[in-house]
Amino acid sequence: MASNCFFAVQERFYRMPINGWKKLHKYYNEKFGCTETLEVLKKLAQSEMGKEVKSEENGERRRIDTCLADTCTLTDTTEYINLRDKFLSKIKEISENEIGKVVVRTRNHPNELVDSKVLDLINRVVGEYAKAHICYDEATRKEKRRSAWKENIESKISKLVLSKDLLEKARKQEKLSTSETKSLKKIMREFNLNMSSVTDLSEALVKKNESLNRVESEHVVSRDEIVSFWFTMWNKNDDTVTYDDYLIPFVSDNHPTTFPSLNEFVNIINWLSNWKAAGIDGIYNFFIKKLTTLHKYIYDIVKVICLEGTTRADWFYCGLTYLIPKGIPQRGSDYRPITCMSTLYKLTTKCVTKVVQL
């Protein structure tokens, strides 16, 4: 009875609330007419909760974690409830949209900066993994200024143009103002050159021209040209190709069906790189690894895909392709494509690979 009460409280509030043990102790003694001390009640609950139980779902042995020594403050409880409400709202939000059209890119989180408390609370309320990463991100995000990369590039080009004009003026030995002379000295110090030498001024001008050309020439290939080139690679091929002549037409009935166990599947998950580029669902491996509640459900999904050949939603087979420039691109072919598939797709192919390698 004591363990059942504690388990119900733990499920609701994650830990025993402040003064929760006192109220449980009073209720227990009144209910059963006992005079047990609080310490005895705690030991009784701990001994019952700590027993190994048989999991009906997967037949594995597991130990129920207890938090008998910890209490849950009002702040902890409020944070748990807020995270639960946020998670449920995200589930509702994503159910009204298609995956791939609502991708929210989250930040990479170094291990030493991960808020394990928030992650543990999310792990308790998670019922579907598609929005858990955003829930964590919003719960831990600190407001940052918008990146001004475009303005920075424009400012860099503007400064290079001014430097080039100033060097041209100095090389022609035109009169410079005090501020222009100061700027010229700074430019020449940058290249360790002498501002009194016309040759050095010409050399500095060449270097500034090279820098300006390099900045202005980055990613000047038009979008239409890139699309035109890569469309020939990605267009749909309607020709049906079969390999019937090469396939074995018969498989024995006693051929064993092989598939990784749940433990092996979890091991595959643990070997995934945390922050490799995410697929169309926008979910990094980090969240799949940390949200251990989901592992059994993901395993069941992947197993059905592999063994029953069940067709999934279109987004499962889609990827995000990034075009990485090779040097300074001048045409559409000067990019190297990298396609990122979803983690669920990668887990499916890794399971198939494990079986094929046997």
Image (spheres, rainbow, N blue to C red):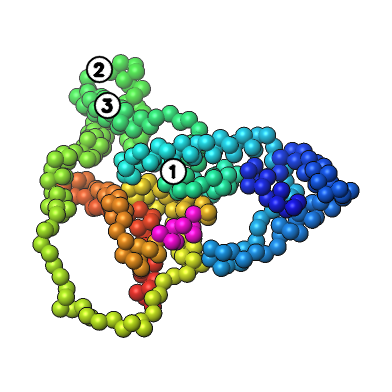
Picture disc at residue 170:
none
**Residue 163 locus on image (x, y percent):** 27, 27
User: Which is more toward the observer, 117 or 82?
Assistant: 82
Q: Distance between the residues labelled 1 and 2?
A: 64 Å
Residue type at mark 3 is Ser
Asked which secondary structure carries label 1, the reply is helix
Residue at image position (51%, 67%) is 263
For disc 1, the marked residue is 131
**Residue 143 locus on image (x, y percent):** 48, 30
The image quarter in which residue 71 lies? top right
For disc 3, the marked residue is 158
Residue type at mark 1 is Lys
Magenta span covers which residues?
294-301
Q: How far apart are marks 2 and 3 (CA)?
A: 22 Å
Which quadrant is the C terminus positioned in?
Answer: bottom left
For disc 2, the marked residue is 175
Q: How crowded is mark 1: few (under 14 residues within 10 Å), some or many (20 or more)?
A: many
